[in-house]
């Protein structure tokens, strides 16, 4: 018996040490915190229009391009159980899975499905979510996007070979009508010398960070009406987003694009409303805008750079930086326009209207761009700052022609020079409700009957279709008694 105990005791100790070391041994997974997964694509787009088909499935691959096994600690949908999407990762379904192993230089397939009610008209235009992956403390994600309502969805159809940027390229003339809304996903680029015509009542919804870009020689013609304006806005339809700035990018009319026309348009809730770039020619307006509203831009309503713009009966309101940024010269005329800025998301410190005639090049040398004219007639420039106008002209060089003719201005500048004709200074125009972007004049407004009759006669109706009897009221809206 003593011999037996002596024989087994070392064996038991050795077995115990082996088991202990086994429980602590290396799992074989690469735990390097810099490890990254590779994916077959970074965005999964579901092409099905879900008002006709209720579900669809797509897939992508997750690659381990490393020389050791890896363990994905968790995969989950950002929206969790509230998501319209579901996934199956390496045979494991759900909205959350953990501990997915991938061998070295191997991959797994993730299937993603979306199911929606085909007749649910309360769905957003675009349903989005993300599938998140966590490995060794690092997080990566795949974007998911699906169409949620019956609409015309325009998504990238071209990838630039040099930059690798994908966008939709419009290579022929198009006309959009109001049967269904248009939803733009990503950059929408109008090719050179092509014309996009948008007829009355058409609704254009731009997804987050999406923009419309018009290349040289191209044009946009917006033909809205008083009863059926053309609307540009974000694609989120919930009440929270109804007046929220910054939901999309901009409408960019690039250098040498031409003959752009906006009539009865509403452009709202983006970053920049209309960006009009330099053209080098002032024979015809680059942009003619009438009877239109630009509001709730997180940056700038009208970003104008050395261009030629004519505007009448137009309201530019509630922008995070400037309502009109007139930069590096150009030629501009604004008649019966209302520039109002009571932006309440954050603190605005920049004047509503900025005008200059120069810039500094990359070598910090001043470059003069003549301001041929910047004329404001029968207009209102008024907001929450003490000074809503900044004239920034390089001293002694270049043209700096501007004029305020029968305007109501919020400014600390002297207004006695010949550039100022019958100007009302720092008098509250008595807008009806600035919080609701309602810039109708109330009874007793100092803007009533203070217009230049010659300008008023050229624009006989206001933005609401009311007759404008000379001398006319200042701004885009003629005074009429407001009914409750």
Image: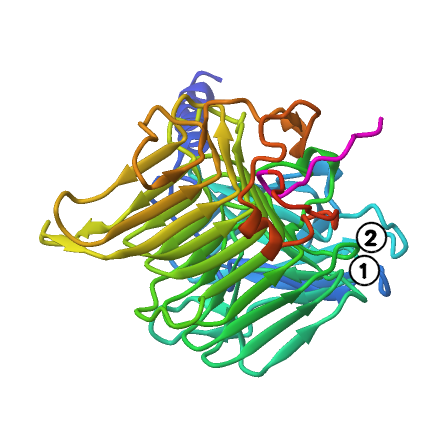
Name the quadrant containing residue 432: top right
The residue indicated by pointer 2 is 116
The percent position of residue 5, horizontal first and vertical second, equals 45, 19
Cα distance between the residues tagged 1 and 2: 6 Å
The percent position of residue 174, horizontal first and vertical second, equals 63, 78
Query: Which span is picked out in magenta?
Result: 474-484
Q: From the viewer's perspective, tell me whether residue 206 is left or right of residue 325.
A: right
Mark 1 and mark 2 residues within 8 Å of each other at the beta carbon:
yes
Colouring mode (rainbow / by chain / secondary structure / one colour):
rainbow
- In the displayed structure, 294 sits above or below 108; it is above
Q: From the viewer's perspective, tell me whether residue 58 is left or right of residue 256.
A: right
Does 374 lie within the magenta span?
A: no
The percent position of residue 426, horizontal first and vertical second, equals 46, 23
The residue indicated by pointer 1 is 55
Question: Residue at 59% of width from left, 73% of height from top?
Answer: 196
Residue 131 showing in the rendered view:
no
Secondary structure character of the magenta stretch overall: loop
Name the quadrant containing residue 29: top left
Question: Residue at 78% of width from left, 31% of height from top?
Answer: 481
User: Closer to the camera, 272 or 304?
Assistant: 304
Residue 184 showing in the rendered view:
yes
Question: Residue at 53% of width from left, 41% of height from top?
Answer: 246
Q: From the viewer's perspective, tell me whether residue 33 is left or right of residue 15.
A: left
The C terminus appears in which quarter of the rendering? top right
- In the displayed structure, 444 sits above or below 121; it is above
Name the quadrant containing residue 450: top right
The percent position of residue 418, horizontal first and vertical second, equals 31, 40
Earlier along the polypeptide chain: callout 1 or callout 2? 1
- In the displayed structure, 450 sits above or below 230; it is above
- In the displayed structure, 161 sits above or below 336; it is below
At mark 1, the secondary structure is: strand
User: In this figure, what is the number of numbered marks?
Assistant: 2
């Amino acid at each position: 018996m003593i011999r037996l105990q002596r024989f087994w005791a070392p064996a038991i100790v050795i077995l115990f040490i082996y088991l202990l070391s086994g429980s602590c041994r290396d799992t074989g997974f690469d735990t390097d915190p810099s490890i990254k997964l590779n994916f077959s694509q970074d965005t999964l787009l579901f092409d099905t229009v879900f008002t006709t088909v209720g579900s669809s499935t797509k897939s992508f691959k997750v690659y381990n391009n490393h020389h050791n096994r890896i363990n994905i600690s968790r995969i989950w949908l950002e929206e969790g159980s509230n998501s319209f999407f579901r996934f199956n990762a390496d045979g494991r379904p759900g909205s959350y899975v953990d501990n997915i192993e991938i061998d070295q230089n191997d991959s797994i397939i993730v299937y993603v499905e979306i199911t929606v009610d085909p007749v649910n008209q309360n769905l957003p235009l675009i349903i989005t979510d993300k599938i998140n992956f966590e490995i060794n403390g690092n997080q990566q994600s795949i974007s998911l996007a699906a169409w949620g309502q019956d609409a015309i969805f325009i998504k990238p159809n071209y990838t630039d070979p040099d930059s690798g940027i994908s966008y939709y390229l419009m290579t022929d003339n198009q006309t959009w009508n109001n049967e269904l809304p248009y939803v733009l996903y990503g950059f929408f680029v109008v090719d050179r010398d092509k014309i996009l015509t948008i007829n009355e009542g058409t609704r254009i919804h731009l997804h987050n960070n999406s923009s419309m870009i018009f290349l040289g020689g191209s044009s946009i013609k917006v033909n809205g009406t008083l009863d059926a304006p053309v609307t540009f806005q974000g694609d989120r339809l919930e009440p929270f987003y109804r007046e929220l700035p910054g939901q999309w990018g901009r409408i960019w009319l690039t250098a040498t694009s031409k003959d752009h026309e906006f009539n009865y348009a509403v452009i709202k809730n983006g970053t920049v409303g209309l960006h009009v770039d330099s053209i080098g020619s002032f024979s015809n307006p680059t942009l003619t805008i009438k009877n239109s509203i630009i509001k709730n831009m997180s940056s700038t309503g009208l970003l104008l750079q050395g261009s030629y713009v004519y505007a009448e009966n137009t309201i530019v309101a509630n922008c995070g930086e400037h309502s009109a940024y007139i930069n590096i010269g150009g030629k501009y005329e604004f008649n019966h326009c209302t520039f109002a800025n009571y932006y309440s998301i954050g603190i605005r410190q920049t004047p509503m209207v900025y005008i200059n005639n120069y810039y500094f090049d990359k070598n910090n040398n001043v470059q003069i761009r003549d301001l041929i004219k910047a004329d404001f007639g029968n207009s209102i420039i008024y907001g929450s700052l003490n000074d809503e106008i900044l004239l920034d002209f390089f001293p002694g060089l270049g043209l700096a022609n501007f004029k305020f003719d029968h305007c109501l201005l919020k400014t600390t500048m002297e207004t006695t020079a010949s550039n100022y004709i019958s100007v009302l200074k720092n008098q509250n125009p008595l807008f009806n409700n600035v919080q609701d972007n309602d810039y109708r004049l109330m009874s007793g407004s100092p803007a009533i009957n203070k217009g230049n009759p010659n300008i008023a006669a050229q624009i006989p109706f206001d933005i609401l279709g009311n007759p404008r009897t000379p001398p006319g009221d200042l701004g885009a809206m003629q005074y009429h008694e407001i009914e409750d």
